[in-house]
Amino acid sequence: MGSDGGHCSFVLLAEFDILAGAQLKYQFPQPLGVDESVLAMSMLPDGAETQLDDWTIFFLNQTPFNTISPVLALDTPEVKTTALMGEPTLNANDKPDLLCVLNLVRTKHDASLDRGARVLALAICTRHPFIQIFKPVLLMALDDYFSDPSQDCLARLFDAVNSMDLSGAPVLTRNEKMVMRSSERKDIFAEKFTHLAPPHQSWSNGKTALQHRATHSAESFSSFEEGILMRKDKEREEAVIAVQQSTGQSSPSEASFSLGGSAVWVGDESGIDVGSGEGEEDDSILSFVGTTVTGTNRRRRSTDASSGSSQAHLKDGLLRPSMINTPSYYDPQLRSGMAKDTHFYHTTVAYKDHQLPIKMPLGTFPEEVGDYSLITLIKAFSFQTLVSGPSHPHLHTNGPQTHPIIILFNALVTGKRIIFLGHKKPAGEVSSFVLSACALGSGCGAVLRGFIERSFPYANLNNRDEWEAVPAYIAGVTNPIFKSSPTWDLLLDISTGSVTVAKDIHSTYPVSAGMPLGVPGIVRSATFSTETSLGSEEDMARAGGKDGKTDFGAKADNADNLFIEDIKSAIEYHYGEGLVRVRFTEYVLRFVRLASRYEEDMTGTTKFGYPSYAFDTRLPNPRLGSGIVFNDDSAGRKELASNSHRIEAWRKTNSYEYICADFRNAQLVDAIQGFDVAHQLFRLRNAKTMTEAEVSAIMRTLAENVKTYDQVVELLAYLMPHGGGLLHLAFSLFHQKESVRDATVDLFNQLRAFPVGVMFLQALNHFQRYAYVRQAHAREKRMMPEQQQPPYQQQPLPPPPPQQQTQQQSHHQSMYGSSFNRTYSSDRMVTPMSNGAF
């Protein structure tokens, strides 16, 4: 992103005239070449005079009637917003980029005027989807115009926005954005901000900021924070001294536990400082991300070697900590000049004599425009009793019991015409619902595309013919006259929370035959086992209905309804917007993988997913499985059948074409190539039974193919923290085969080489981190020549008696519960080995 030019393409000002109506008064720096009446009506929504302030959003270059001509010279490819994965590069003959227009409407009452008020609207046009960052400067500019109504105000706004410096903002890849938005840690990818550190704070010679901590730093944090830090350091020192006195051993060095200032080893969190430095907030955040630190006296000592041997191993052995030239982002010594939350890039806009702070979100996709809220959308439409109209297989995947949010999602992906009606509601509120719906259908911008290009956050009667001519439009209106319009398929009233399906939807979208179940030529035996793929007549009747047509009647265990109930519970327990967005991203990802499986079963191949087959050891080299995984074959067939109609309808939309292009592009640019990563992780997490050969092949393949930074980030993008992160991979540290354990250690060592991998390792519990450290040290000892091993190293731990092994197994099972027992049964639990690995 450049430091100047390209943030703002145009500035527009409209005013309501008592005689002429809405008028576009100024276009800066030159006319857009679009019908001025269309722009003016979009900027001055119906009922604007009843609101003191209102925000609206609309788009340019969306349809022929609002396409800009000519394109300004400053709209260069260098300032384009980073595209979603797989988005093809635009050629000169392609349609121009979509421009987002952020519009502020204000009514200023004045008794001297004919109507008693003056209504003005000021708008900026930008390519950036995070248009909410421009609200402060737009508010100030409109105030400026009211006091000095001239075109100079528009010029000042244009220059101020374009002079905003975003040159230091890191441009994240899709996988980096996925990792960032799923992480609550405010120092995620802090290494990308090291160039913003003050010049005197350097990390040369492979040393971290913690090793260069200055004595006096009053300029970087307050005396209150300093007192807290000094108190914590004193408590830590007292705890260490107490341990030394009780054990008679010297304290292990900090290097024996930490990795370049980022703790991974058991019990040591001295290198982690993820809070703001204000009291006990640090501990609460640490406990949230899974570090399980509750006090400084919980710092555990090394149990596998003395301090000297541990240090020797780290200096001379394979476990030398990678010197990460990155300070802890929340080290109070370094907070001056560095961001407090790496999810945002902090900059300023200089408008007149004011420096307006700007927080630019770094994890935004092009399909996410503005500051939308999925929680607000879900709360507004949560009552199934308010759904009216006929049931349609494209929309009602669970019959009359289909949740309104699922009906909305189905309407979005199947290309239905959708209207959000907000009678007597601010136009900005209606616009927010439309943008939230676009994010919902796209998986928060991370999975599907094509929704923003057909959305009209605020639509009106003046341009009705144009936006109603767009197939599968998503529009927000405030005029109740649209309720009686015959051109929509689904109408959602945000005032009442009601959802109405058009009465003639069956004639508009005739239903084709669903997926015929139980036909050997259709459902391939390679994807379902032979004895269950054909199915009994009773199974076919329950899943298929009459004449082979899919029965979309209500099912108590419908996956969609269970998902929505889970989301509603999360909202009820006050989980944040971030978690809800991540869950919907996972939901859309599963829909795409399910659709890929359906397409493969119906046509024999799929254009946007890996082919479906199980793990096979009959080949010279075992072949890993791929495609979506069903824990139960019968349930898998029923799920495919119940989703067949909406998948068929989705395959006829532009969104389907986009995902096919995205997948083809991913096969060329993805860092991890040659196998389906999501399939392997799902098997490790959810498989009821797995052979030793499959576990070994999966872990060995991951260890061999996840080495570079891009490969590490791509793997972590699949491992959402709320789903356990590395938890299920860490279970392989307890596998009975040594080759599986060694492959897991190799993989974790490769993750540990990068700061983001260190953070995921920190989220493991102490038991898992301890197992990793012990096995890694033991493996290092085996690989070191005997003459290089230090003479003072601790002797290997003897194996415990059989009864002690049984007690340990019971303890492990009590710690992990059913999840542990499902993944590794007690008879497969590895016992402490004679080589000292445990």
Image (spheres, rainbow, N blue to C red):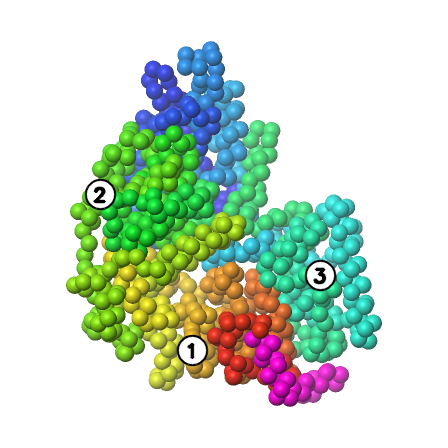
Q: Is residue 796 magenta?
A: yes
SS for dot 1: loop
Mark 3 vs mark 1: which is more N-terminal?
3
Quadrant, the C terminus: bottom right
Residue 227 within the segment the image draws in magenta: no
Q: Residue 466 at what x, y percent from top left?
A: 26, 35
Observer-nearest of 374 and 272: 374
Residue 503 image label: 2
In the rendered view, tell whether residue 63 sits above or below residue 738.
above
Spatial CA span between label 3 and label 1: 39 Å
Q: Using a 10 Å C-alpha cutoff, classify the residue at mark 1 as few (fewer than 14 neighbours), some (14 to 19) or many (20 or more).
A: few
Residue at label 3? 295
Q: Name the residue at 50% across, 71% down.
A: 819
Q: Are marks 3 and 1 in contact (CB under 8 Å)?
A: no
Q: Which mark is residue 141?
A: none
Looking at the rendered structure, the secondary structure element under dot 2 is loop
* Rendering coords of residue 762 (x, y %): 60, 65
Give amino acid for label 2.
Answer: Lys
Query: Which numbered marker is on residue 689?
Result: 1
Lower position in the chain sequence, tag 2 or tag 3: 3
Residues at circles 2 and 1 in contact by the CB criterion of under 8 Å = no
Q: Quick check: 169 left or right of 40?
A: right
